Image (tube, rainbow, N blue to C red):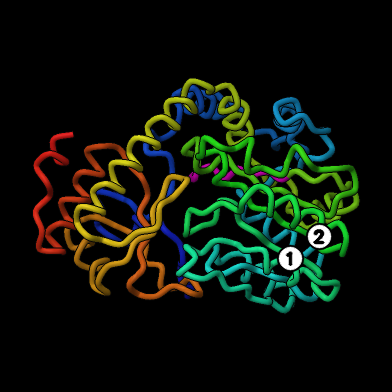
Amino acid sequence: MVLSGYGHGGDIYRNRVRLDFSANVNPLGTPPEVQNAVREAAGRLAPYPDPYCGALRAKLAARLGVEEDAILCGNGAAELIYSFALALAPRRALVTTPSFSEYAAALEAARCRVLPFPLVRKRDFQVGEEILSAISRDVDALILCNPNNPTGQCVAPGLLVRILERCRETGCLLLLDECFLDLTDREAAFSLLPLLRPGDPVVILRAFTKLYGMAGLRLGYCVCRNPELLERMSRFQQPWNVSTPAQAAGLAALDCGDFVRETLALLSEERWFLETGLTELGIPFLPSKVNFLLFQGDTDWGARLLAQGILIRSCVSFPGLTERDYRVAVRTRPENRALLAALAKLTDKKEDDKNAGK
């Protein structure tokens, strides 16, 4: 059997990996409460799962302050990206680059013409005001990742509001991917969710994958206060697409407030540790607001680190990036220290004793 190339992080099954920095999943793993919920759900595998994810949607609605009918659950965020493209069938869609590759893949599967909107390295790949003029009446959809993967940058809140207003004005569909937003401490400032009005042509995408360490379970959801759009998306989902264990895991995860607070504190401290280490090694990087960093090195660094059992994400497949660009997740202190030590060998520099002792 021939499979298409895998273009994402986390490919630990074909490589000998002792430290995986290529996937941006919570370094603390999966909360014990979620693991227990999955074990309990294993006794309920004979019946079909709830096709409407009723209990999970109700709990999410109460948490987010929206109607239950404004939430659609999916088999990970990726399924919902494809549902958006296939169901709403835009003819021309604007996609910022570099960004998550599945946006373009889904749009192309729906025979949509993808219009790249390049972000500039010298401006740290920030989305600028020029995007407003690009959202014309000739553009049917805009896909925006906030915070962006792989750059870790957020759209300025004021500009994000203007993008929303421009989409309302032109009727442009907006898919706003906020899957990494709950891994920042600025969710309230950077989310459009509180500003959504009934009928808005906006779909906000989120997932349990990263924050709750649930990549192996596949659970995502979207929020849309336009019932017609959401109903059309639901038609392009398979029945029983969210398993019983995944629904149980989602319900349990929403009660893990202490785990979330511990995670955010750890990420803040360890992101600083990694940024400090990269600075001392003279490795150029992009300061990030989330749980990963984009940096530049030599073209062979990925292979040389993998030879040591350390997997990082080559970003050569991202439009606008090169084979010298790499993305690494923020992990625990021992893991981050090991990465910096390995990078120090590649740069022919020794890790600073003071830094190594922290």
Three-letter amino acid code at the position of disc 2: Arg
Structural distance between the alpha carbons of marks 1 and 2:
7 Å
Tell me the element at label 2: helix
Highlighted magenta segment, given as a residue range: 215-222
x and y percent of residue 44 in the render?
62, 28
Three-letter amino acid code at the position of disc 1: Leu
Q: Determine the image quadrant of residue 139.
A: bottom right
Q: Which residue is mark 2?
A: 166
Residue 32 relative to residue 282: left or right: right
Q: Determine the image quadrant of residue 337.
A: top left
Front position in the image: 68 or 166: 166
Front position in the image: 233 or 167: 167
Q: Residue at x 67, y 63 (%)?
A: 129
In terms of secondary structure, what is the magenta stretch mainly?
loop
Q: Residue at x 72, y 79 (%)?
A: 113
Q: Which residue is mark 1?
A: 132
